[in-house]
Amino acid sequence: MHRTAPLEIAGRINPLAANVLLDLKANARDIDLSPLTPYSVRHLGYGIEKGKLSVNVEYLVEDRKLAAKNNIRLDQLTFGEKVESSTATDLPVLMAVSLLKDKQGVIDVNLPIGGSLDDPEFSVGGIVLQVIFNVIAKAVTAPFALLGALAGGEELDHVDFAPGRAALDQEAKEKLAKLAQALDARPALRLDIVGRADPAVDRDGLKRAALERAVKRQKLASLQSGEGAPKSVDAVAVDPKEYPALLKRAYADADIQDKPRNVLGFAKDIPVAEMEKLMLAAAPADEEALRRLAAARAQAARDHLVEEGKVGAERLFLVAPKIEPAGATEKRAGARIDFALR
């Protein structure tokens, strides 16, 4: 055997008792993993290039029942090329390792196990192996649950937006901050960002956003020469008292063919509600506008993660935007961005 790791065992055992009593604690440190490549290929489909294993176990057998604690620490576990093996798991092992490995390249997991010695299927080795596979399966089937645990249990797989908007609200910024924190703790992960637009809610939202921006542009035009003027339309605030006058100016500038006219052919004054209705009807909200909205949402999240979250741009990938309503079984809105890990 490879004599590369110290082993310590302490405890007590009474094998002659009517019910076997075992109270055992053991630990082994810095076991080189590369000699385990044949087992790794057989069960995982990858050889092991390097890595060390440390284990700390506590086993208690009393009244023919086992209760055990297994702390497993894998340091710098690195797999080689994939090897075809009919007995290997189909789970994405490399993805699981990326999810579990921290900034120092360490995987540290606790695996409690238990069972009855009277069970004919009972096997300590089988139980430990099953628990390890359960950890891998959970990591790859619910990756954001594991990632969210690093950020206080937050659900980090999506960010919602107001209909027709691509601006990040405070809740979205707080969620992205937690996502950046979790990505910092798992530096091997890459993130896909998918912007979405939902025609059912975003068409009307786009129209209302266009109306608001037209009104704000009127105020911005009057402030541009003043000191402390807003730097963009989105930064303009409109007081309800000044809204009707600004709306009237925006309506006058709007390219609306069916404006009500007086006997002389000039556009006549109409109530606020009527001006809003005509401007909303004329605002663009076609498929291209929805696509741009979905793309802008993804871009806003990407920029925030890079600039505020300090996530490396090389780890973030913008995926082609999707225009589709929220599914019938989905509880969240379709006006959002979704994240995927890889």
Image: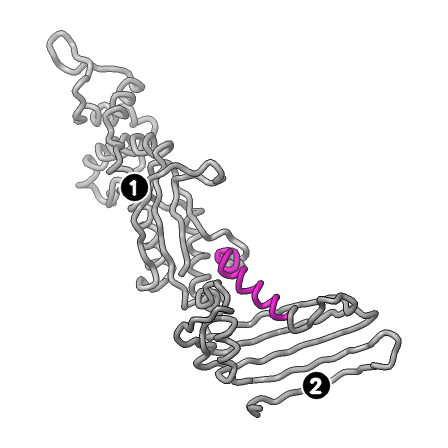
Prevalent SS, magenta region: helix
Q: For the C terminus, which image quadrant?
A: bottom left
Q: Secondary structure at mark 1?
A: helix
User: Residue at the spot x=20%, y=14% of the render?
Assistant: 260
Q: Can residue 102 be seen in the rendering of this structure?
A: no
Q: Can residue 20 be seen in the rendering of this structure?
A: yes
User: Residue at the spot x=41%, y=76% of the render?
Assistant: 80
Please report the bounds of the magenta region as a residue range. 128-147
Instruction: Read off the residue under disc 2.
Output: 9
Residue 132 appears in which quarter of the rendering? bottom right
Whether label 1 touches label 2, CB < 8 Å: no
Q: Position of residue 276 (x, y in %)?
A: 29, 23
Instruction: Read off the residue under disc 1.
Output: 293
Q: Relative to residue 52, is residue 112 depicted above or below?
A: above
- Give the residue at the far right of this rendering: 18
Q: Position of residue 305 (x, y in %)?
A: 36, 57
Q: Position of residue 39 (x, y in %)?
A: 53, 77
Residues 291 and 1: in front is 1
Q: Secondary structure at mark 2?
A: strand
Residue 95 appears in which quarter of the rendering? bottom left
Q: Amino acid at mark 1?
A: Leu
Q: Relative to residue 108, is residue 223 depicted above or below?
A: above
Residues 332 and 246: in front is 332
Q: Relative to residue 292, is residue 27 depicted above or below?
A: below
- Give the residue at the far top of this rendering: 263
Question: How many C-alpha atoms fall within 10 Å of the one at disc 2: few (<14), some, or many (≥20)?
Answer: few
Left or right? Give the position of 171 relative to 24.
left
How many numbered marks have been drawn onto this rendered protein structure? 2
